[in-house]
Amino acid sequence: MYTDPRLSGYLSRALSHELAAVQQYLMQAKLTGLWGLSAQSAQFRRDVNEELVHAERLMERMLILGIPCNATQLPPIRLGRTLAEMLQIDRGLEIEAIRLYEEAAFYCARRQDGETQALMRALMEDELGHLKELDQQLSELKGE
């Protein structure tokens, strides 16, 4: 089976991003738990689960296409010293994901790969929703 190297690259980058987000949110869940912020810790744990579902969906698509499921390099965790800092860091992660999924979906459309395009669009929509949640949480922290 022929595998488009560019498509393979998008899927591998997406998988790496999702697994990096799992790592990030899990560490933030632990840290906020240590700070006594149980509600925020629980929210970070929900985020971990959402990102794991994303990773599974990407792995399934990669297996269907015959692409090895390798998360190449995970970036270092950035925790932040305050909850607001954490949320700002997470906001940047989500924006990166949205850009990646948008670019990948556009490429898939040009390739006429509707299934992968639909996956990328669905992941992008989930990340847009998460970005909206982060913006809401930041607004609440600022008292707006």
Image (spheres, rainbow, N blue to C red):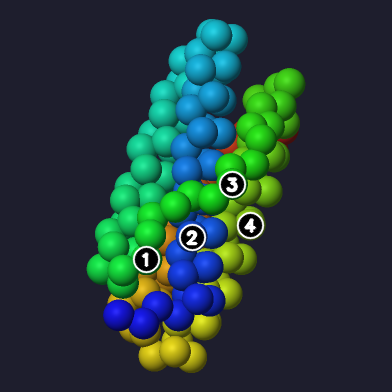
Task: Name the residue carrying label 4.
Answer: 96
In percent of width and height, residue 56 lies at: 32, 51
Q: CA distance from mark 2 to mark 4?
A: 15 Å
Type of the residue with mark 4: Glu
In percent of width and height, residue 132 lies at: 55, 51
Q: CA distance from mark 4 to mark 3?
A: 15 Å
Q: Nearer the viewer, mark 1 or mark 2?
A: 1
- Image mark for residue 12: 2
Residue at the (55%, 9%) spot, across then down: 34
Say which element carries label 4.
Answer: helix
Type of the residue with mark 2: Ser
Image position of 54 with respect to 61: above or below: above
In percent of width and height, residue 48 lies at: 42, 36
Say which element carries label 3.
Answer: loop
N-terminal of the two: label 1 or label 2? 2
Quarter placement of the N terminus: bottom left
